[in-house]
Image (cartoon, rainbow, N blue to C red):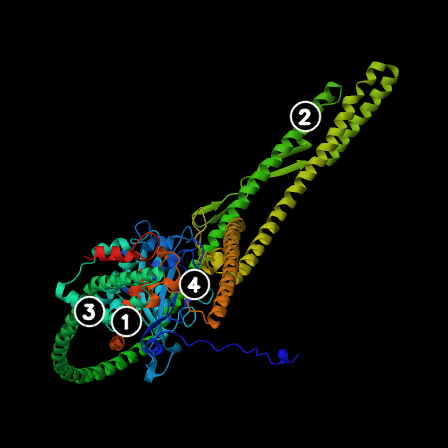
Amino acid sequence: MSDILDLDFAQPPAPAPSGDTGRFGGRWRLVGAGLSNVWRYGDLDLPAASGRLLLRGPNGTGKTTALEALWPYLLDLNGAKLAAGKARPTTLKLLMSEGAPAKGRRYGYLWLTFAAPAGEPAPNAPDGTAANGNVVSFGVRLQYSPSSTPAVSVVPFTVPGRPLKDLALRGANGSALEHEEFSAHIEAAGGRVFAEPEEYVEDLATRIWSTTSAELRLLAARLREVRNPTLLGDVSPAAAAAAAAAADALRQSLPGVAEDVLTATAEALAESDTTREAFERDEHAATLLEEFARVWTGHVVDVTRAAHAAARHAHDDASTRRRRVQQCIGLLETAKADADQAGGDVQRFEEAHQEAQAAARAIETSDAYRSHGRVMDLRKRLRAEQHAAVSSYDSLHAAAQQARTQTKTGRDALDDIIGDLEERVAGAEAAGAQPVALETLLAHHPRARVTRPVADRVADPGPGMTLTHDREGLEQLAAEWTARARNHCSAADKAALILRDHDPVAAAQETAATAHHTAARAESAYDETSQAHDRATAAARTAARQVLAEVAQWAPGHSALRGLHDEAALDGDELTVWDTNDVDALTHAEPAAVRDQLDAWADQALRIGETLAAGHESTAHQHLATAASLDATAAQHRLEARHLRSGRLLPLPRPAWAGPGEDDTALGALLEWHSALHGADDRKALLELALASAGILGAHLHEGGATPTPGTSALRDLSTSTT
C-alpha cells in the first residue's frame, strides 16, 4: 500500500525546444496561410505557429494543389509557373473553375501570414503599438469570369492580421464582395490594395525579406527548381575562384571532425569489420558533403554579387532623391504663392456664389417659377388620366363587343322559336283551323343603340332588338286549337282514325308554351348577364388592385426571389428582374393582364427559391463533410501533441516527391551551423528554406551517398546538373 501512495503521477518536464529560439523570434517568420473559395476548398485556414507548414492526407485531397497555389506563387505572382511538375496542369483558371458554379462569377483568396520580430511594432500600427497580434498577411484576390479575357484577374493586397479571423471576406449575408467593397474593407483595416503585381512584390521584398524584388523573384525561382528537380538543369555555377571561396565558407559553417580524432577512432575500431565499414560510409558522406558544398557555392556567390549591386543602386537612388527633394522645396514655395493667390480668388468666387444664390431664391419666389411648377403637375396629371382613359376605353370596347355577341345569340334563338311556330301554324291550318297572322303574336325588330365616341374612336355595341308578343292572342290561339282538338277527340270517338290527328294539336300547344317560356327566359338571361358582367369586371379590378398592393409590400423584403441575388443564373431563359415600379405600372392594367404577369413572377420566384434551397442544402452537406474532416485532423493533432509532450521531435520536412524516410538516418540530423556564422541570419534562413524544400535535410544516408528516394541520388544529380 505504501508503494502505491508514493507514486508520482506528475508528467515529466517537456524537453527544451531544439535550435536557436532567439534567432527564430528575432526575424520575420511564417505563422499561417490560407485559401478561401479556391479549387474545391471553402474556407481553409492553415496555422503554422512553429514556422513550418505540413499537409497530410490521402491522395487526391489537394495537398499539392494547395502548395502550388500558395508557395512560391505568392512570392512573385508568376501564374505561368504554378505547376510543381511537367505532368501537372495547374493554372489560375483551373484553380478557379474547378468547383465553380456552371454560370456566373467566382471570387477566391490566397494569403500568407507573417509574424514580426519580437519587439518590433506591427505594420501600419499607430505609435508602434501592437495590432492584430503583430502579424501581417500578403495575398491575392482572384476574380474569375468565364467570359472575360483573361478568365482570372489577380488583385494583390496586404493587410494587418489574418483573413477570415480579423478580416471578413464576404458580406453580411454571405454574398461575395465587389471590388470596391473589398478595397474599402482592406483600407479600413489599415491595409493596401496594389494596382500592379510589381508593387506587391516590391513591398513584400522590402518589408518581410529586407531585400529587393529581383532577389525575391530569384528566391522563388530557386524554390521552384529544388521542388522540381527537372528544372535544376537551368542552374549554372559562378566563376571558379568565387565558387571555391563560397565552398570554404559553407564548409566552415557545417560541423566537422578533426583528422586526428578520425585517425584515432579508426585505429581503435580497426579490429571490427562492422565498425570499419561504418567508418568508410562516414568518410564517403564527408566527401559527398564537400561535393555538395562546392556545387552550392555558386548560388552563394550570385546572391552576394546581387546584394552588392543592389546596395550600389540604392546609394545612387538616394542621391537622385536628395536632388529631387531640393527641387520639390522650390516647387513648394511656388505652390504657396499660388495658394495665396487662389485664396483671394476663392473669396471672390464665394461673394459671386452668394449673389447667385440670392438671384436663385428670387427666381424661386417669382410667379413664373410657381406657374411652371403647376404646369408640370398638370402635365403629370394629364398623363395619368390619359393612361386611365385608355384602360377604360379598352373595357368599354370589350363590353360593346360582348353586347353585340349576346344580341346576336338572342336573335338567333327567337328566329328558331318563330320558325317552330310557323311550322305549327301550318300544321293547324292543314287540320282545318283558321289562318293566323303570326307577326302579330310574336316578332322581333332591330333597334338602334347609342354609340359612345371617345376621342377619335367609337365604342359601337351594334343594333339592339325589340321583342313584341301578344300573350292573350297566343293563349286564345291555344284555346282555339284546344277546342278544335276536343272536337277532333269527339270525332275520334266516332272514328278511330280521327283520334290519331289529335297528336299534332297537343304538340302545337306544347310548342307554343315552350316558345313563350323560352322568350321570357332569353330576355331575363340577357339582362342578368349584362349586370353580372359589370359586377364581375368591377370585382376583378378591385381584387387586382388589392393583390398589387400586397405584392408591392412583399417585394422589398424578398429581393433574391425577384432575380436580385449573387447565385448562378437558372438554366434556361434569362431571369426577369422586377421591382415596385413594375408593380405600380400594372395598377391600371386589365385584370387578365395583371393575373398573367403575377403568375409569371410567382413561377419565377418559385424556381429561384427551389434553386437557392438546393444550393443551401448542398452547402450544408459540404460543411458537415468539412466538420468531419476537421474532427479527424484534430484527433491526429492531439495524438501528435501527446508524442511531442513525451519528448519526440517533429519529423524533418520532406517534399511530396521524396517519399517517407527515417529521421534517425537523415542528413538534417547531422548538420548544425558553425558558431562563426551566428550573425548571418538572413542567408542561413534562405539556405535552410532551400534545403528543406528540396528534401535534402531529410535525405537518407547510406553507403552510396544520400538519396531522398530509393535508387535515386539527389545530391549526385544536383552536382551533375550544376556543373
Three-letter amino acid code of the residue under disc 3: Asp
Comes first in the chain, label 3 or label 4: 4
Whole-Å distance between the Cαs marked 2 and 3? 136 Å
Whole-Å distance between the Cαs marked 1 and 2? 146 Å
Disc number lying in front (4 or 2)? 4
Instruction: Answer few, some or many: residues within 10 Å of disc 4's Cα (few below 14, many 20 plus, some between 14 and 19).
Output: some
- Residue 495, by quadrant, is top right
Name the element at disc 2: helix
Q: Which residue is mark 3?
A: 248
Q: Is residue 354 visible?
A: yes
Comes first in the chain, label 4 or label 2: 4
Instruction: Answer few, some or many: residues within 10 Å of disc 1's Cα (few below 14, many 20 plus, some between 14 and 19).
Output: few
Comes first in the chain, label 1 or label 4: 4
Q: Which residue is mark 4?
A: 44
Residue 222 spot, x, y in % from top left: 25, 61
Instruction: Answer few, some or many: residues within 10 Å of disc 3's Cα (few below 14, many 20 plus, some between 14 and 19).
Output: some
Three-letter amino acid code of the residue under disc 2: Glu
